């Protein structure tokens, strides 16, 4: 298997988490993931799948979905409660569309089904290609988090990520380029399982109208928070409870 993963919990149900775009693999900080999702550890065996550390040029979101699907099939997982965040939500939509037999319920957070290639993330792409790490970290943090969290954690994030290697920047760039122009809007009607769409009305990466359009086409439940930015999945205290309630229903 070419992708790394974290697993924890001992429940009879299977939950799969697909994370968003990050400067380094989320799987490198397993304890942080376990702490963040401990609410699910009793009822679920939880898997967080990362993405290939060395993605090839021309990568597409569909390719990432197939990598995850292959891992899921190799591990013989089934009846999955799938949770996709941001870029991971795009991957989750492709996975559900192309492997509907694997997924039982789906939660999409801070994500869309169509990405305008000229949106704000093009600034991230510019800094990543220029290898301007400090500006990349600053722009990423400002766009993803609320002002309060940005001010609280920006120094720590610079300390953590200022040593990004050329290989890490290249992988980030390739995955970001895969998001630009992503569009599966016309296929959304093929998803027949229960779906919950979550997000923030103040998201600075995707608009609430874009996220709401995904929910409208899916004819599914949705909830949009006030007072948070793109990373509502990290900041809203009750969001894990909301996801758990939907999965358990």
Image (tube, grey):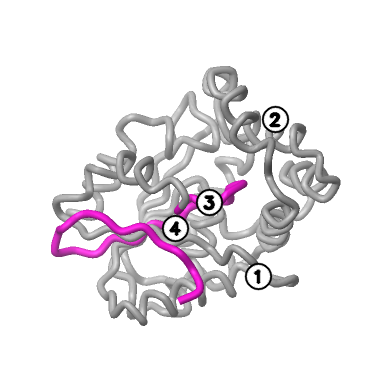
Mark 1–mark 4 Cα distance, whole angstroms, equals: 15 Å
Mark 3–mark 4 Cα distance, whole angstroms, equals: 7 Å
Q: Which mark is residue 138?
A: 2
- Which residue appears at 36% of the width and 71% of the height? 192
| Camera-nearest label, 2 or 1 | 2
- Which residue appears at 25% of the width and 43% of the height? 38
Mark 1 = which residue? 60
Q: Is residue 167 above or below residue 76?
A: above
| Camera-nearest label, 3 or 2 | 2
Q: In terms of secondary structure, where does tag 2 sit?
A: helix
Mark 3–mark 2 Cα distance, whole angstroms, equals: 17 Å
- Which residue appears at 46% of the width and 27% of the height? 226
Q: Earlier in the sequence, mark 1 or mark 4?
A: 4
- Mark 3 vs 4: CB contact within 8 A: no
Quadrant (top left, top right, bottom left, bottom right) of the N terminus: bottom left
Q: Earlier in the sequence, mark 2 or mark 1?
A: 1
Q: Earlier in the sequence, mark 2 or mark 4?
A: 4
Q: In terms of secondary structure, where does tag 4 sit?
A: strand
Range covered by the magenta-colored residues: 1-27
Q: Is residue 177 left or right of residue 103?
A: right
Q: Which mark is residue 20?
A: 3
- Please state which of residues 33 and 198 is positioned toward the viewer in this rendering: 33
Mark 4 = which residue? 18
């Amino acid at each position: 298997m070419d992708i790394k993963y974290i697993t924890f919990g001992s429940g009879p149900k299977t939950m799969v988490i697909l994370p968003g775009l990050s400067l380094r693999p989320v799987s490198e900080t397993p304890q942080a993931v376990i702490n963040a999702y401990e609410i699910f550890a009793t009822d679920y065996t939880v898997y967080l799948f990362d993405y290939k550390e060395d993605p090839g040029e021309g990568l597409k979101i569909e390719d990432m979905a197939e990598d995850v699907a292959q891992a899921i099939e190799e591990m013989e997982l089934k009846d999955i409660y799938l949770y996709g965040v941001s870029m991971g939500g795009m991957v989750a939509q492709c996975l559900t569309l192309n492997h509907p037999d694997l997924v039982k319920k789906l939660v999409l957070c801070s994500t869309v089904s169509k990405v305008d290639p000229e949106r704000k993330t093009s600034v991230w792409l510019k800094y990543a290609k220029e290898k301007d790490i400090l500006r990349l970290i600053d722009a990423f943090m400002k766009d993803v988090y609320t002002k309060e969290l940005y001010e609280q954690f920006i120094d720590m994030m610079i300390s953590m990520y200022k040593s990004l290697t050329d290989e890490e920047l290249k992988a980030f760039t390739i995955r970001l380029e895969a998001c630009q122009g992503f569009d599966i809007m016309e296929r959304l009607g093929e998803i027949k399982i229960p779906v919950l769409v979550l997000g923030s009305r103040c998201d600075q990466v995707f608009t609430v109208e874009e996220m709401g359009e995904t929910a409208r086409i899916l004819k599914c439940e949705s909830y949009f928070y006030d007072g948070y930015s793109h990373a509502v999945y990290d900041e809203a205290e009750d969001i894990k409870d909301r996801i758990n309630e939907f999965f358990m229903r």
